[in-house]
Image: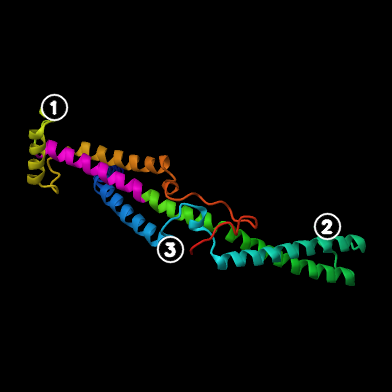
Amino acid sequence: MAKRKRSSDNGGCGGCLAIIIIPVLIVFITPVALLSIFIYSLFKYFSITRYYHPFKKTYDDFWLNKEDKDEYKYYNDVWIKNYKLLEDIDSAVEEQGISRNNDGAISTRSKAGKKLKADFDKAKLKEENASNRIYDLQYIPQTRWEECNKYLKNSWASFIGIIGYGIGYTYLQLTHQAGISWREMGFDIDTINIIITSMLRINWFNIALIDKVELFILSICIAIISWVLTLICSKPLAMLTPYPPEVDIENIDLYEGKH
């Protein structure tokens, strides 16, 4: 019975410790995380977009370059050629009365069947390889745009979060450390002077006088607001350059990529 009680006590202490540690971690991690996300996202955005600047604000910005276009056209021709070849082989199978297996594959019991089956497999492999490469090239402009947009979105949202956290943190420091009573403050030059003077005197790294619950709530709210901003303004890059369409044989030469 004593051991069971000790275990229960340890569990209670662990729970209390977690209740204390988690809010503390949130308070300190939130500004650090926002700053880290901002710096990393901004660095990634500029490191990627340096290949595409200056933006023309057209589909050209992330479009395929000449080498990619030539590759797309080559594989498109390969796909068409082998697709037609597969149709011709299917027609030959029907005309020659060659049977098929239960899975629909060409029977290889006859010499003609073996040859047609070998030709079919070879053409099918080329057709699939060409189709896969076309698919990759088809979405390159959109993939480039989406990658740049992701980092721009994260840097923008984290920047707003940093500003919001800074304002809230300043308010709490002025309230609790400088002892400013906001209800008694007016909107005049004296108020501005008091705020500036207080900001120069307080120790910004001292959070001993700040209400910890208020600081915790501030951290939670800023984290939520930053996340919500990424949902509300999910495509900030659209203000700089439009989202490109999928590449196809009809529009491939309408635009000229840089990279």
Compute the Cα span from label 2 to label 1.
85 Å
Q: In the picture, which quadrant includes the N terminus?
A: top left
Query: Does the magenta portion include 42?
Result: no
Give, as a three-letter code, the residue at label 3. Tyr
Q: Secondary structure at mark 3?
A: loop
Relative to 214, is 236 on the left or the right?
right
Compute the Cα span from label 3 to label 1.
53 Å
Give, as a three-letter code, the residue at label 1. Arg
Q: Position of residue 251 (x, y in %)?
A: 61, 55
Query: Does the magenta portion include 170?
Result: yes
Residue highlighted by disc 2: 102
Residue 199 location, quadrant: top left
Which color mode does the image show?
rainbow
Q: Position of residue 117 (x, y in %)?
A: 81, 67
Q: Residue at x 30, y 41 (%)?
A: 222
Q: Residue at x 15, y 44 (%)?
A: 207
Relative to 31, is 109 on the left or the right?
right
First in residue order: circle 2 vs circle 3: 3
Q: Which residues are magenta?
A: 155-178
Compute the Cα span from label 2 to label 3.
53 Å
In the displayed structure, would residue 36 be above or below residue 116?
Answer: above
Q: Is residue 127 visible?
A: yes
First in residue order: circle 3 vs circle 1: 3
Q: Position of residue 177 (x, y in %)?
A: 10, 40
Residue highlighted by disc 3: 51
Q: Secondary structure at mark 2?
A: loop
Q: Residue at x 25, y 39 (%)?
A: 218
Residue highlighted by disc 1: 183
Q: Nearer the viewer, mark 3 or mark 1?
A: 3
